[in-house]
Image (spheres, rainbow, N blue to C red):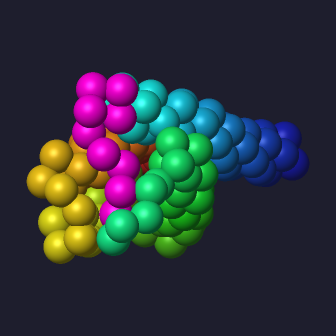
Amino acid sequence: MMTTTTNTTHATTSTFGALIRTGVIAAVAASAATMAVAAAGNAAGVGLDVGGAPIPVTGFGVLTVVFSLVGVVIAALLSRFARRPRRAFVRTTVVLTVLSLVPDVIVDAEATTKVLLMLTHLVAAAIVIPAVARRLAA
């Protein structure tokens, strides 16, 4: 019985650690991807000005990491408290991703800039959500 308890505790810790590691790696990958998308868009002539102020390419990366890590925290909480963590995580993050597009639609920017902003949100979500979801119990 003692061995089973130790193994169960170890498995839970390992799974939690794997979730965090995967989330951090996905956040970094998504950060690099959103900076690449922003840089490519800018190089193609899409402005990065919002409300008359330019967004630095690194700003895309920083915000991507911050909000991706918020997603990892959500995943960690759901893994502990939700009956079906993966399903709850995917549903929650898809809704949050859709909601994240709203400011892009209404922001004071050119149409091409708005599309680029929305694209960066979708790229980040496409990287982080599946990676983290795979680490959650179905």
**Which span is picked out in magenta?**
42-50
Task: Give the mark count.
Answer: 0
| Residue name at image x 64 percent, y 42 percent | 24
Would residue 99 be visible to someone looking at this image?
A: no
Q: On the picture, is 106 further left or further right than 65?
A: left
Comparing 18 with 83, the one in front is: 18
Residue 98 is inside the magenta segment: no
Question: Could you say where residue 87 lies in the image, as x and y percent from the top left?
Answer: 29, 55
| Residue name at image x 36 percent, y 49 percent | 48
Question: Could you say where residue 112 lies in the image, as x and y percent from the top left?
Answer: 16, 46
Comparing 34 with 86, the one in front is: 34
Comparing 36 with 122, the one in front is: 36
Q: Is residue 133 above or below residue 94?
A: above
The quarter of the picture where residue 95 lies is bottom left
Question: Could you say where residue 136 lies in the image, as x and y percent from the top left?
Answer: 47, 46
Q: Is residue 72 above or below residue 20?
A: below
Q: On the picture, is 132 further left or further right than 119?
A: right
| Residue name at image x 33 percent, y 71 percent | 51
Residue 49 is inside the magenta segment: yes
Q: Is residue 28 above or below residue 78?
A: above
Q: Is residue 26 above or below residue 43?
A: below
Would residue 55 be visible to someone looking at this image?
A: yes
Question: Could you say where residue 35 lies in the image, as x and y percent from the top left?
Answer: 48, 36
